[in-house]
């Protein structure tokens, strides 16, 4: 079995066409660009911490009456990751955890990260980065290259912690953004979590920015958290001026966000602005609004989208989500991402499940005569790597 699980099970009848075999033989070797990811654990978690990291929505330990292994993601871990750790597929949760603990985090990451087959990792370090491998260390451990994505809200919070005054704030943010992104490939905003996306996305006047900064800085405290709509808008428009691709969290996430306020359609007013039209806008995750994101990618030349994060969490249903993401969005505007954070299982599974789901989807279209096999391979390569190489200028 190849690490990504594309080799058919021995019990399946070998009645596939030559085109099917060519696709299956080619796709496992395609080196991907994971355009939105976080670091892998630098040190081993305990079992409670590991299971907690298999859930996206809740905070805190898994209740004693349930297990995170009893989920589509948990089943995928036991099916696809267990063999890479020297266990049979579908090993029990207890057996899986014992083996993982026996190997240790460095060995686990050394087996799982390279098996993802990712050449470039675009790493957001803005969430609990002190627990994770740095972009450089992640790339080295995985046999690829790590790149930095700068989180806009973290820059504002850095200014607050440094005691920046309200009058200086507008220009201080702009200067810090330029300095922090000198070697970065993109910026990201988590406005979805802080304010929702249902904002007036016009560029705020400097006087309004200073007034908002005065209010926020007065209340920020020792652990500042940017949640002021005016300052979030200021950050995004400064990023537009900077010209790097801007990543927006949309759709599925933990319970800090209000899901009905993170539909990517709420960004339409921003996307219509002429200055924004010149900057790649990356809609992350999108599920369950991936069809809405596909519309935006169709309607606006600068918009790209992915279904990262969801592919891991829907597990065996990944093919349905991947197929829906390919309904309306132009193929040159779709990207691959895992949004993995913490366990190296998520970095591996993001790639393995995406390859498997994508192969199954386009194989069916080829078999039905709707696509040719050369077109299938060309489009899969576009989504898996070429679109990101172009958009991020890698």
Image (spheres, rainbow, N blue to C red):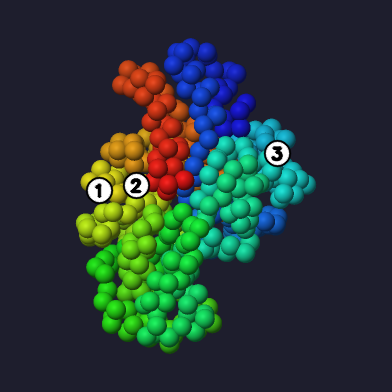
Measuring from the top left, give residue 186's x and y in whole percent. 44, 56
Query: Which disc number belongs to residue 300?
Result: 1
Circle 1 — which element?
A: loop
Marks 3/1 in contact by CB < 8 Å: the verdict is no
* Vertical placement of residue 227 versus 94, above or below: below
Q: Is residue 313 visible?
A: no
- Specify whether 34 is left or right of 250: right
State how far apart marks 1 and 2 are (Cα): 9 Å
Query: Which disc number belongs to residue 85?
Result: 3
Say which quarter of the image contains residue 153.
Answer: bottom left
Q: Residue at x 48, y 61 (%)?
A: 182
Which residue is under mark 2? 304
Marks 3/2 in contact by CB < 8 Å: the verdict is no
Mark found first going from the N terminus, 3 or 2: 3
- Specify whether 89 is left or right of 224: right
Circle 3 — which element?
A: helix
Which quadrant holds the N terminus? Answer: top right
């Amino acid at each position: 079995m190849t690490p990504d699980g594309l080799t058919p099970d021995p019990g399946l009848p070998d009645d596939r066409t030559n085109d099917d075999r060519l696709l299956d033989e080619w796709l496992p070797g395609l080196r991907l660009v994971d355009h939105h990811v976080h670091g892998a654990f630098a040190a081993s978690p305990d079992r409670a911490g590991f299971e907690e990291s298999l859930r996206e929505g809740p905070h805190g330990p898994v209740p004693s009456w349930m297990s995170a292994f009893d989920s589509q993601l948990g089943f995928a871990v036991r099916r696809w990751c267990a063999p890479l750790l020297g266990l049979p597929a579908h090993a029990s949760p207890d057996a899986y955890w014992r083996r993982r603990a026996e190997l240790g985090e460095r060995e686990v990451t050394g087996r799982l990260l390279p098996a993802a087959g990712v050449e470039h990792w675009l790493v957001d370090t803005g969430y609990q980065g002190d627990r994770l491998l740095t972009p450089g260390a992640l790339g080295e451990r995985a046999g690829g290259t790590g790149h930095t994505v700068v989180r806009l809200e973290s820059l504002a919070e850095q200014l607050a912690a440094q005691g920046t005054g309200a009058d200086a704030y507008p220009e201080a943010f702009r200067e810090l953004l330029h300095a922090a992104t000198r070697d970065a490939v993109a910026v990201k905003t988590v406005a979805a979590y802080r304010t929702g996306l249902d904002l007036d996305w016009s560029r705020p006047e400097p006087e309004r920015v200073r007034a908002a900064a005065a209010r926020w800085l007065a209340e920020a405290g020792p652990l500042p958290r940017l949640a002021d709509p005016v300052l979030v808008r200021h950050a995004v428009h400064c990023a537009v001026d900077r010209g790097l691709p801007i990543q927006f969290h949309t759709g599925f996430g933990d319970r800090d966000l209000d899901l009905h306020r993170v539909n990517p359609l709420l960004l339409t007013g921003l996307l219509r602005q002429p200055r924004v039209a010149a900057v790649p806008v990356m809609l992350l995750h999108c599920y369950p609004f991936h069809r809405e994101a596909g519309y935006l990618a169709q309607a606006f030349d600068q918009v790209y989208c992915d279904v990262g994060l969801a592919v891991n969490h829907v597990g065996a249903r990944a093919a349905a989500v991947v197929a829906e993401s390919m309904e309306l969005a132009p193929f040159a505007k779709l990207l691959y991402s895992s949004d993995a954070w913490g366990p190296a299982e998520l970095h591996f599974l993001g790639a393995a499940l995406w390859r498997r789901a994508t192969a199954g989807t386009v194989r069916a279209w080829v078999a039905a005569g709707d696509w040719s096999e050369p077109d299938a391979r060309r489009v899969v390569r576009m989504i898996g790597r070429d679109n990101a190489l172009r958009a991020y200028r890698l």
